[in-house]
Image: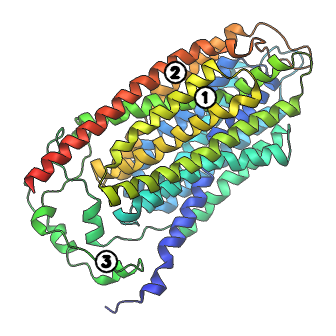
Amino acid sequence: MAVRPASRLAPRPIITLLASLLVALASGTNYVFSAYGPQLASRLHISHTQLNAIALAGNVGVYSSSPVWGSSADKLPPKLNFSLGFCFLLAGYSGIRIIYDNGISASESSVSTSVFLLLVFFAYMTGVGSTGGFTMAMNVTAKSFPDSLRGSVLGLVVSGFGLSAFIFSFIAQHAFPGQTSYLLLTLALGTALPLLIGVFVIQPIPLSVTSAHESVAKVGDVDSRTPLLSPIPQNAVAESSVTSESRSSWGINQVGKKPPLEKIALLQHFHGRKLFASVDFWILFCNFALVSGVGLMYVNNVGSIAQVLYIHEHPSNYNKIEISKWQATQVSTISLVSFSGRILIGLLSDFAKARWNIPRSYLLVLVPISALASQIILASHINVVSELWKSSVLLGLGFGMLVSLSTTIVTEWFGLAHFSQTLGFLTVSPLIGGNVFSIPFGRNLDRHSNAEIPTSVSLNVCLDGRLCYVDTLYLSIAGCVVAVFLSSWAAWRDRIRRAEWQLLE
């Protein structure tokens, strides 16, 4: 078989990467909720606790469907998954918009139970659709780039997921401020169409055997992961004869020492029972649950926080458009910083590993530290809405680093063969963290919301500023402290494993 010139094949991974980034940009819109959530609550007369339930339904859709999408991504072609994601997103946001536009009748004091459950269902659909598109974008990217680039390219795609909220909240803030119906229409079309593009454009590019072997974590028993001798699979021998054509498709000259076949036999992937028996998986799972739970609490409620702080400053001058702009500003800030954090931590982890041989797991402790700083500042220093950006920046940074770094660590610790499925199991953890922190936040805010704004706004709100929600922040601060300990423990265990591996070489 003739080898095609590298220059002709080099654009293939670039096209795949750009298309995956476009899908990711359309898949992170659950974090736009705070840009329209308070307005939804006001129009339909629902409480903060109910509002958090709707927001969490979207989060549940994102994280509960991850294992299913992950398994499907590892076994089925991308087209089916992208098509299903397209349908979920279009139907979900369109349903929410229809309910918002219809409102409630003059005889109703609040939205009916059946309509509320429909809102929960449609929010769930948006989460499921988002995960479908994002999972496929991540799966194709992870399997199309070698280990030397994987941290950076995964960070780029994951950052697109975080930047999604910035794009849509920016549109809401500048194109139609205060017009929630138009924002929901933009979400319905702007999220669904990129997945339709993915159906026709995104296809995985096979890696060379050398690159694939570099990606596999050196593993053994479920806790220490020191290597165990195992039979050489037949497909390992067959794959060792991969031609230079697959390597040249990158436009990169694969220079380096090819791992001996004996060492290839020592490599295995974690999945199934072995994954769930791994202490390291559960450390990563709990750390992800805590930090993402705090992040979801803040992201889902930052619109309400901005509303509370604004009303505390202007109790007799309520301006719906001004408040909506502050809400969109916070969503944009979190999204933009999250985008930057996901790229920066990917580049930093790749550079630290290549230059100083520092494991990526060592950087994991930066994630809860950033989230912890955000909660401390929010609880003790922020009394006006114009200062809320400080907490949003720190939270967005930690949230972005968490997703990007955890994704890369999954490929190192548990292998690529079941990457999407493993990542799917890991991302079930925010279901726990989100409920632990978000529901108490909503209930606490409702408990303090016993005064009506002296305007036509029907939603009860709290007039006490920071005191309206500070009690819940003590819980989130405690969660971040535990996450700092777990991240440090994960890094220490990784250090011990690497020392044991070096002794065996």
Q: Is residue 469 left or right of residue 408?
A: right
The reply to whether callout 3 and callout 2 are in contact (CB within 8 Å) is: no
SS assignment at label 1: helix
Can you say whether 242 is above or below 407 in the image?
A: below
**Image quadrant for the N terminus?**
bottom left
Q: What's the mark number on residue 476?
A: 2
SS assignment at label 3: loop
**Image quadrant for the C terminus?**
bottom left
The quarter holding residue 58 reads top right
Viewer-side residue, 472 vs 365: 365
Picture residue at 53% right of the left edge, 21% below the top: 437
SS assignment at label 2: helix
Disc 3: which residue: 254
Q: Which amino acid type is shown beneath numbered disc 1? A: Tyr
Disc 1: which residue: 298
Picture residue at 28% right of the left edge, 48% below the top: 414
- Using the rendered image of the protein, determine whether residue 89 is visible from the camera's viewpoint: no
Viewer-side residue, 274 vs 5: 5
Cα separation, mark 3 vs mark 1, equals: 45 Å
Whole-percent x and y of residue 20?
Answer: 54, 61
Picture residue at 52% right of the left edge, 39% below the top: 399
The reply to whether callout 1 and callout 2 are in contact (CB within 8 Å) is: yes
